[in-house]
Amino acid sequence: MKQFRKGFVIVLLMMIMIILQVGYALSQEYDFRAINWWMTRDEVIASEQGELLLEDEKMVAYAVEIINMETFLVYYFDERDVLWGSTVLFRHDYSDPDLYLDDFVYVKEVLTQKYGEPFIDDVRWLDDIEREESGEEVKLGNVRYSTFWSTETTLINLILEGEDRQILLSIDYCNLDYYLSGLLEELGEG
């Protein structure tokens, strides 16, 4: 039975990859900003115009403005020093936690205009007891918002979550081939 499930998941992942690549017919010049997956660290640094904040062997971080909002932008590199992913962390310090929820809705609208309707739009109550949606519930860690889009080459995940009374709004961009190959590796080891 376990072998059947593993085989089923592998086939399902392969079908998703094919559907996503075939279904997205719009051509893009770049995968994200002025960046393409598999660029080297030096190529990313030469292309990115933000203020360089931090650089180490696995990542490069910038302060940039994205959709009129201040952010930290982090690029991730693998052991071959090529780009596989990126995270946008929105820099807010609101006293009213509902403003984070407003920002989530705004960013979601912008991403939907750019990438089309999301294929997953999830509101997850951590204790399975639904309450009124509010920034305070996010801040307490009771609810997590996660919305996914994809392009031919990229998986995009917008996240609003809270922990220890801190709220984090972020967007993760991942090379779709890199992500799916990692999942297949995990399934092969399990």
Image: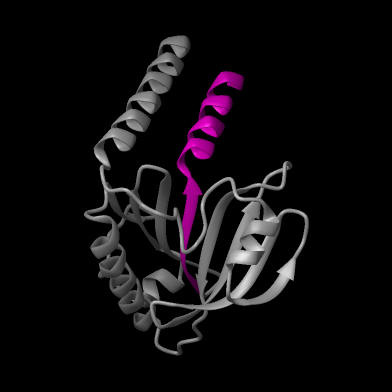
Q: Nearer the viewer, residue 55 or 160?
A: 55
109 w.r.t. 122: above or below: below
From the top left corner, tell me how far across and down residue 172 is, in percent. Answer: 48, 57
**Relative height, residue 20 to residue 109 (above, below):** above
Identify the residue at horizontal 31%, vertical 63% (top origin): 111
Which residue is painted at 71% across and 47% down in the image? 81
Q: Quadrant of residue 138?
A: bottom left
Q: Nearer the viewer, residue 25 or 92?
A: 25
Viewport quadrant of the N terminus: top left
Question: Which range is magenta?
Answer: 167-190
Residue at 74 percent across and 65 percent down: it is 55
Q: Is residue 164 magenta?
A: no
Rendering coords of residue 73 (x, y %): 56, 68
Q: Is residue 120 left or right of residue 68?
A: left
Query: Is 170 a magenta residue?
Result: yes
**Quarter in which the C terminus is drawn:** top right
